[in-house]
Image (cartoon, rainbow, N blue to C red):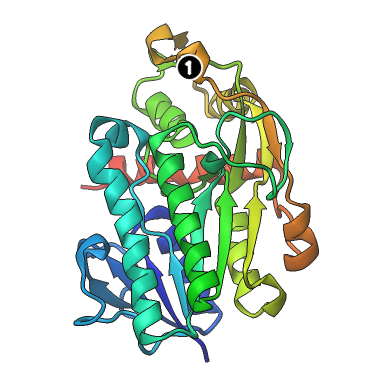
Amino acid sequence: MKSILVTGGSGFLGKHLITELIKKKYLISHATRNKDNSSDDKFKSKEIIVDLSNYDPIINSLVKDKDIIIHLAADLDINKINEKPKEHILNNINSTLNILEDIRLNNPSCLLIFASSEKVYGNVEGDIKEETQCFPNDSYGCSKFICEKLIDSYHKTYNINYINFRFSNIFGPNQRIYLFIPSVITKIISNPENVQIGNLKPYRNFTFINDALQAIVNVIENEKAVNNTFNISSYNTQISHILSIILDLFKEKGIDPKIYQDEKLFRPEEKEIKQYILNCEKARKILSWKPAFNLQEAIEITFKNYWDNDLNTKNKP
């Protein structure tokens, strides 16, 4: 039985992943900065409280008895990163560097699985493969790209094995509401008469949470996946199309939201992302991976989660 440590275990992807790995009978522990009392699996997954960006792997190794480290921990909120870029960028980079040092010093045979991002590509166009040159143009993308280069350097210098996932925007049940899909759903639930949104014209890549989980699970026992980078994306679609699906779901509940576009929420034209599609053929061939749900189904599952949670909250005494 493989022993796996998940960093960022209290985050959106981390919680879903721990649940999935426990079902697969792996021996799981997870590292988090703050104690988490919300997970149903907390008694099945050993919790380690640690600041990954500021721990000493010589004194307190996290990897000594582990077969795999799945490194998800990162500061993701673009608004917070833009407010305090140095703090958040250093957190993302130092966390990865400390884990690499821990593996180098204490367990060189441990496999590192890293959650990177499509943001490493920057403002590109067309069909994007893993070999496409990366020119990240925001702080978050830069931090992820630096982490990828650190991982590559440790692989070449110290023979540390890795797998990188360049995920597009992951969404699904129980996600934090600062991202587009949960933000729109919760805004409408809260006040359907005045829903402020930004630009609806751009296209975005999205990954449904179940598909992200399947990609990670598919590499754990797959030797062919080692020392590779994989694009993972379920859909490429216009923001307006996402909104239309959400609005139809609300109309089925008897709610007709009033949508207002606020130009203050638009990105500056020179920073607006061009349309590009992540080519996932490599993941299909090596990981036998493909999206399990169509876009309509994925949004319906996500919508039901937020709708039911709101009803449960209102019905509490």
How crowded is the residue under tag 1: few (<14 C-alpha within 10 Å), some, or many (20+)?
A: some
Q: Classify residue 142 by image quadrant.
A: top left
Residue at x-position 64% and y-position 42%: 133
Residue 35 percent location from the top left of the image: 20, 65
Q: Quadrant of residue 202?
A: top right
Q: Position of residue 313 (x, y in %)?
A: 30, 44
Q: Nearer the viewer, residue 241 or 3?
A: 3
Would you place residue 78 above or below residue 115 in this image? above
Residue 77, by quadrant, is top left
Specify whether 140 is left or right of 242. Answer: left
Q: Looking at the image, which residue sits at the far front?
A: 157
Q: Is residue 89 left or right of residue 167?
A: left
User: Circle 1 — which element?
Assistant: loop
Residue 41 visible to the viewer: no
Tell me what residue is drawn at x 76 percent, y 57 percent.
282
State whether residue 181 is above or below residue 100. above
Image position of 49 (left or right of 9): left
| Residue at the disc numbered 1 | 257
Q: Residue 124: image x %, image y %?
A: 64, 30
The image shows residue 172 at horizontal and vertical percentages of 51, 47
> Who's the residue at 53% across and 27% down the image?
250
- Left or right: 59 as drawn, with respect to 31: left
Vertical position of residue 15 compared to residue 142: above or below: below
Tell me the amino acid under the disc marked 1.
Pro
Looking at this view, is 257 or 90 the one in front? Answer: 90
